[in-house]
Image (cartoon, rainbow, N blue to C red):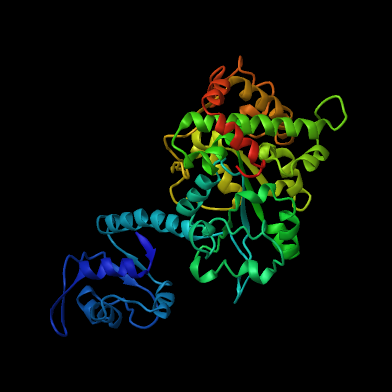
């Protein structure tokens, strides 16, 4: 078999052909009359097998542990060795087995992220926009674990959420990039993951102003959305319900609080007209002071699309994220330009989930229907704008309960609101004393 002279093959040949008896004395073994070594340059000849041990190159290989310098490898590659197949096949086979592993490891370490960095820090290319209580923390945890991405240098939860684009008074490029340090992120793939960014009206324009034209074009954005009613209940539990132990009190509080939020939104949205209109104008007029707007994703995405291209923003649903993780990972990583360390086999962790005695796990069926009616048109607009979104609740057709109810995770019980409020009138008073942004 003919092949170019390489350090691995020379090692195999020399170990098989030559054994050292004493310093300066070499003898030959298992050399067939047809075995030859050919080539040109220093150390090569067509001498008989008995004289091979005097070849300078083989002596150097044995003494130095068969270490070839780059120059020697370059000169030797023009030569070839002819050996019996029984000798070369096993070693060549092992070499072929190792190469895919080395190639795979090399691919895993290659990053398509090319942030602009200075001594002061780097401008991230990847942004996880939210939504809050929709699975963004689970997505962020997956990116950190499975793609070698990095967050900021800030401590605690600010590693994920800098909140710089939402608390943006006097924000400069130097201040923003200072928390993304190249020395702490070998992959160069920085992710800014503040979930409030998606609904922060000025955030996309602030970020746009901090970036160069090239950075704007290279940026990628990811938004995780969740069925709005279940998101709203999860947000209530996250912000308030875990402070109390009595579940029924928390249910009474949520029911009254939601009744008042719905009424306020309806009054604002109608504004003299005959019906509620789902439009950008209504959203921008009524969002202030009423956190029901957090589940209205379409106008939030539209706001970001005014500053960045639609194709730069990938919207995925938490339903698909947890139910079809492999498909979701491929879609997300292809968009962000990342490699999966697990080969797309990792499962999304249920990060930031809470279990406690007072957790609200069901609401009154009338309240559930009122919330669903509020979000229905907003969900449909999201579906129309992003037809590829795997979220059955987003379409009025597929979200019909008689068609498919597997997406509906919100439990309800008829008359629960009245029961809870009769037992805990203090909860009604507490809800009345709060602003709609408190919870």
Vertical relation: 25 (above or below) 388: below
Q: Residue furthest left?
A: 21
Q: Residue furthest bottom?
A: 24
What quarter of the picture does the N terminus occupy?
bottom left
Q: Residue 424 appears at what percent x and percent y? A: 53, 28
Q: Which residue is nearer to you in this view: 185 or 434?
A: 434
Please give left or right for residue 242 compared with residue 378 in the image: left
Q: Residue 74 appears at what percent x and percent y? A: 44, 76
Q: Which residue is nearer to you in this view: 114 or 377?
A: 377
User: At x 32% / y 66%, what residue is drawn?
Assistant: 9
Q: Quadrant of residue 100?
A: bottom left
Q: Which residue is nearer to you in this view: 335 or 206?
A: 206
- Answer yes or no: is residue 430 visible: yes
User: At x 56% / y 60%, what residue is drawn?
Assistant: 190
Vertical relation: 84 (above or below) 71: above
Please give left or right for residue 14 compared with residue 348 in the image: left
Q: Residue 112 appears at what percent x and percent y? A: 58, 59
User: At x 48% / y 54%, what residue is drawn?
Assistant: 144
- Answer yes or no: is residue 381 visible: no
Q: Residue 290 appears at what percent x and percent y? A: 70, 40
What quarter of the picture does the C terminus occupy?
top right
Q: Quadrant of residue 36?
A: bottom left
């Amino acid at each position: 078999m003919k092949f170019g002279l390489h350090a691995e093959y020379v090692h195999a040949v020399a170990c098989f052909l030559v054994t050292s008896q004493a310093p300066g004395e070499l003898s030959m073994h298992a050399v067939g009359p047809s075995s030859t070594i050919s080539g040109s340059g220093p150390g090569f000849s067509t001498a008989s097998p008995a004289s091979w041990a005097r070849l300078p190159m083989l002596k150097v290989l044995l003494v130095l542990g068969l270490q070839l310098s780059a120059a020697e490898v370059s000169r030797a590659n023009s030569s070839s060795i002819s050996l019996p197949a029984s000798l070369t096949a096993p070693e060549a086979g092992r070499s072929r087995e190792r190469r895919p592993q080395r190639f795979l490891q090399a691919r895993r370490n290659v990053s398509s992220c090319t942030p602009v960095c200075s001594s002061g820090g780097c401008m991230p290319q990847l942004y996880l926009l939210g939504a809050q209580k929709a699975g963004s923390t689970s997505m962020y945890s997956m990116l950190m674990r499975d793609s070698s991405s990095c967050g900021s240098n800030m401590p605690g939860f600010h590693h994920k959420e800098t909140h710089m684009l939402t608390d943006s008074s006097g924000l400069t490029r130097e201040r923003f990039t200072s928390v993304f340090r190249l020395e702490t992120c070998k992959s160069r793939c920085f992710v800014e993951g503040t979930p409030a960014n998606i609904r922060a009206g000025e955030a996309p324009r602030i970020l746009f102003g901090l970036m160069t034209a090239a950075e704007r074009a290279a940026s990628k954005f990811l938004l995780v959305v969740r069925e709005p009613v279940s998101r709203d209940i999860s947000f209530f539990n996250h912000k308030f319900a875990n402070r109390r132990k009595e579940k029924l009190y928390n249910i009474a509080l949520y029911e009254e609080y939601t009744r008042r939020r719905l009424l306020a939104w309806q009054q604002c949205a109608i504004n003299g007209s005959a019906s509620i209109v789902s439009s950008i104008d209504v959203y921008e007029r009524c969002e202030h002071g009423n956190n029901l707007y957090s589940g209205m994703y379409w106008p939030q995405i539209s706001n970001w699309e005014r500053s960045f291209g639609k194709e730069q923003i990938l919207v995925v649903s938490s339903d698909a994220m947890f139910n079809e993780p492999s498909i979701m990972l491929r879609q997300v990583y292809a968009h962000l330009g990342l490699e999966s360390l697990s080969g797309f086999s990792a499962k999304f962790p249920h990060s930031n989930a809470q279990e406690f005695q007072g957790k609200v796990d069901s609401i009154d069926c009338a309240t559930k229907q009122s919330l669903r009616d509020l979000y229905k048109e907003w969900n449909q607009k999201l579906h129309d704008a992003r037809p590829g979104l795997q979220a059955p609740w987003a379409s009025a057709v597929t979200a019909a309960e008689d068609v498919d109810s597997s997406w509906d995770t919100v439990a309800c019980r008829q008359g629960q609101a009245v029961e809870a409020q009769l037992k805990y009138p203090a909860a009604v008073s507490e809800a009345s004393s709060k602003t709609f942004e408190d919870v």
